[in-house]
């Protein structure tokens, strides 16, 4: 067993469940077989051991005759608690001193300080959550936009898990029929009709393929859309960054090559987080070694971009030059949005400018239109599935399951034995079970839950 899981899971654990530091309220969570007994020994008020679940009680936490704080004790009786064990949550005043004193008293009474994610680990082990739902808890805590919150909530409430469960049940039924055939191999009987198996496997493979296709969108929403601002020196890239985030974040100068390194900022639009990356102006001859390094980093960021805003000076750029520049960006396989800056300085905008987003970054005109274009660029690739994959571990497991199902179809076409078909179906079942945690290892659990915050 890994070191993370080595401790006795029957210990009663405690931790601060709210952020460390001074605040109005702090919440200390206690969970385990002796949670009620331990807290009750410090709590001056009602006998918590005799109170019904999901009730809140006012009292004092005392160290002998010394009162530490007045608190509210929320009681949750197993198995109807978050962890599945008896749990008490103490709402105290948000003084770090008070919180530390209460935790110290709890440890003296027999608690152990919880490790990161240990409460949710117990919820998983007590079958209150499956593994994908447990991972969604961490995603929900980390969500920083409406879209990432929506996806985490959907997964935590079990929509993805139910879909995986349904697929596994269908495959298990066929796998059992095929394995039954093996018991009657000498009689040459076929309990699992191959035509029906083809239909089922093809249907499940299609569902998995849709889930796999949702990953790029889901992962980008979860982590923010990498959006690179690129262009030649003095095109107005840094001014545009400042305009988009409404802050003087980047240094703006008429001197070409002012931006020597990448500058990254984030802003939220229509529930989507965009990670803006301002880059050094791209040109053939850098003024010095430092600018040359900045240009190299600009190219590195372009390779990782989902959206490229190509900013060009509308007063000096020819249609031929723009087409050439845009064509050179196609190799990065990102959505390219041409942005015609300084368009306000043109008496009559050329046709090629009209096909771009015309702005004046300096005068802050056209910026709202550009923001809306960014949202449209993301929305047009939005997967319409109810379920969207955001977790790389889930993606890899689904990919392995899809490969196994393709082997099943190939095997049916090649008229392989039922034994080999059953083997490939079991592989698909194994990888689907990895997602929900029906198949897991101590190392995997340690890797997942050790990344949670303490107290959750």
Image (tube, rainbow, N blue to C red):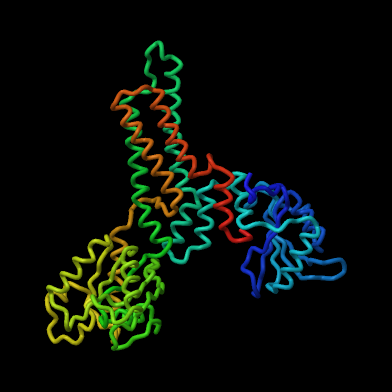
Q: x and y percent of residue 128 in the render?
A: 59, 47
Q: Residue at x 33, y 28 (%)?
A: 411
Image point (33%, 84%), residue name: 258
Does residue 149 appear left or right of residue 200 in this picture? right
Single out the residue that lies furthest toward the top: 187
Position of residue 177 relative to residue 293, above or below, is above
Q: Could you tell me residue 103's position as x and y percent?
A: 74, 64
Q: Nearer the viewer, residue 204 or 345?
A: 345
Quadrant assignment for the N terminus: top right
The quadrant where residue 414 appears:
top left
Residue 405: x %, y % from top left: 36, 35
From the viewer's perspective, is 175 left or right of 131?
left
Percent position (x, y) of residue 382? 32, 57
Quadrant housing residue 289: bottom left
Residue farthest along the front direction in this orientation = 289
Quadrant showing the C terminus: bottom right
Taking the spot 63% from the left edge, 66% from the top edge, the residue there is: 18
């Amino acid at each position: 067993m890994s070191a993370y899981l080595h401790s006795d899971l029957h210990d009663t654990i405690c931790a601060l469940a709210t952020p460390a530091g001074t605040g109005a309220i702090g919440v200390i969570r206690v969970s385990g077989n002796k949670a009620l007994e331990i807290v009750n020994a410090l709590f001056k008020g009602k006998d918590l051991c005799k109170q019904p679940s999901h009730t809140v009680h006012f009292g004092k936490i005392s160290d002998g005759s010394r009162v530490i704080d007045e608190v509210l004790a929320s009681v949750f009786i197993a198995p109807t608690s978050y962890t599945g064990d008896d749990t008490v949550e103490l709402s105290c005043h948000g003084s770090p001193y008070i919180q530390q004193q209460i935790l110290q008293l709890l440890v003296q009474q027999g608690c152990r300080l919880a490790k990161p994610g240990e409460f949710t680990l117990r919820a998983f082990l007590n079958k209150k959550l499956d593994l994908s739902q447990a991972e969604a808890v961490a995603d929900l805590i980390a969500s920083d936009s409406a879209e990432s919150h929506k996806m985490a909530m959907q997964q935590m409430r079990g929509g993805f898990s139910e879909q995986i469960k349904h697929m596994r049940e269908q495959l298990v039924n066929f796998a059992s029929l095929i394995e039954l055939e093996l018991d009657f191999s000498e009689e040459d009987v076929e309990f699992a009709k191959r035509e029906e198996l083809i239909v089922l496997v093809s249907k499940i493979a299609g569902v998995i393929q849709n889930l796999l296709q949702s990953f790029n969108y889901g992962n980008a929403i979860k982590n923010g859309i990498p959006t690179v601002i690129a262009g030649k020196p003095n095109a107005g890239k840094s001014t545009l960054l400042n305009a988009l985030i409404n802050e003087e974040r980047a240094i703006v100068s008429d001197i070409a090559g002012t931006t020597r390194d990448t500058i990254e900022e984030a802003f939220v639009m229509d529930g989507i987080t965009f990670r803006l990356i301002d880059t050094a102006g791209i040109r053939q001859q850098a003024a010095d070694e430092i600018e040359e390094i900045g240009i190299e980093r600009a190219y590195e960021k372009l390779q990782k971009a989902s959206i490229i805003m190509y900013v060009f000076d509308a007063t000096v750029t020819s249609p031929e030059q723009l087409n050439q520049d845009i064509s050179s960006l196609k190799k990065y396989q990102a959505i390219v949005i041409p942005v015609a800056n300084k368009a306000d300085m043109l008496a009559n905008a050329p046709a090629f400018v009209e096909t771009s987003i015309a702005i004046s970054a300096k005068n802050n005109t056209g910026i709202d239109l550009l923001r809306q274009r960014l949202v449209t660029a993301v929305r047009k690739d939005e997967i319409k599935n109810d379920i969207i994959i955001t977790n790389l571990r889930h993606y890899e497991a689904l990919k392995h399951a899809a490969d196994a199902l393709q082997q099943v179809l190939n095997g049916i076409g090649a008229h392989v034995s039922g034994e080999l078909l059953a083997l490939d179906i079991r592989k698909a079942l194994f990888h689907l079970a990895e997602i929900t945690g029906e198949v897991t290892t101590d190392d995997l659990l340690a890797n997942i839950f050790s990344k949670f915050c303490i107290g959750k």
